Amino acid sequence: MKPSRFRHLLLTLACGAAFTVAAPRASAQQAADPEAHPASKVVHEYLGMILSRQWNGSANIVDEASMEGLKADYVARIKQARTMDDEEAMVRRVGKSTLDEVEAMKPRDFYTAYHDGLQERYKVDEPTLELIRKSLSIKLLSLAQESDRLVHVLVRTKHSNGKVMIENLELVSLVKNGDKWQVALNEQAPKLTPVNGAAAPKAGPAAPAADPVKPAVKPATKPAPAAPAKNK
């Protein structure tokens, strides 16, 4: 066999072996269907209720520990309010008169009161909510399983409010409690853990309280005044 033919044969065999090795790897990289995961049903239920403002219903499938964390964060922000007026506004936003009353709230009661406050703020009427429910589509794009008890789901939502079609890309985290998957509200927040005996970082000035769930319908804006007609 001539050397050139021999080199060609070796190259052919090497390419064939590389293809044989790579094929299973490419197959293994194909993403699993996120709808097949048992947490997918909870994602559909949660986003459907959140976007149509069904706070009591959504509270049934939210992890209680994360609702407690949401309340604790809100209380901390009230305590860091820059002025008494800011503190009073945050307290009244959840339907209470004093900070002590907010601290005494049960996690579920706080969760629903907070979102009821959002609904009052954005004034979404029932016909609009019904339209959102009827037009809503939810597509699960991918699912990342961080552990046996924690998953994160990337979702595309679409709905109409009668004026525009609204599309959002959502990331929903879920934790498994017993045999139930529940939405975890605080899994996407940064976590600070002191290392090597370092002291915990001190809290800085209070930032505006962030909404844990983005409103589905933006507040209506007044139309711009018409330009005065030019004299002919």
Image (cartoon, grey):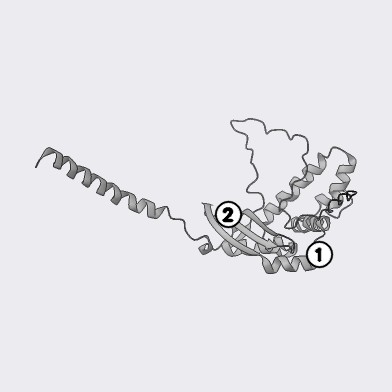
Coordinates of residue 93 in the picture (x, y in percent): 84, 52
Q: Residue at x 82, y 51 (%)?
A: 102
Label disc, if present, on residue 154 of the rendered structure = 2
Q: Residue furthest left?
A: 1
24 vs 94, left or right, is left
Q: Residue at x 63, y 64 (%)?
A: 137
Q: Residue at x 53, y 56 (%)?
A: 142
Coordinates of residue 186 in the picture (x, y in percent): 66, 49
132 vs 231, left or right, is left
Kindly report the distance in space between the C-alpha atoms of the residues bearing marks 2 and 1.
29 Å
Looking at the rendered image, the disc whose residue lies closer to the viewer, 2 or 1, is: 1
Q: Residue furthest front?
A: 232
Q: Residue at x 56, y 59 (%)?
A: 140
Coordinates of residue 70 in the picture (x, y in percent): 72, 50
State whether residue 179 appears in this view: no
Amino acid at circle 2: Leu
- How packed mark 1 is, by other alpha carbons closer than 10 Å (few <14, some 14-19, many 20 or more), is few
Q: Earlier in the sequence, mark 2 or mark 1?
A: 1
**Element class at badge 1:** loop
Q: Quadrant of residue 87?
A: top right
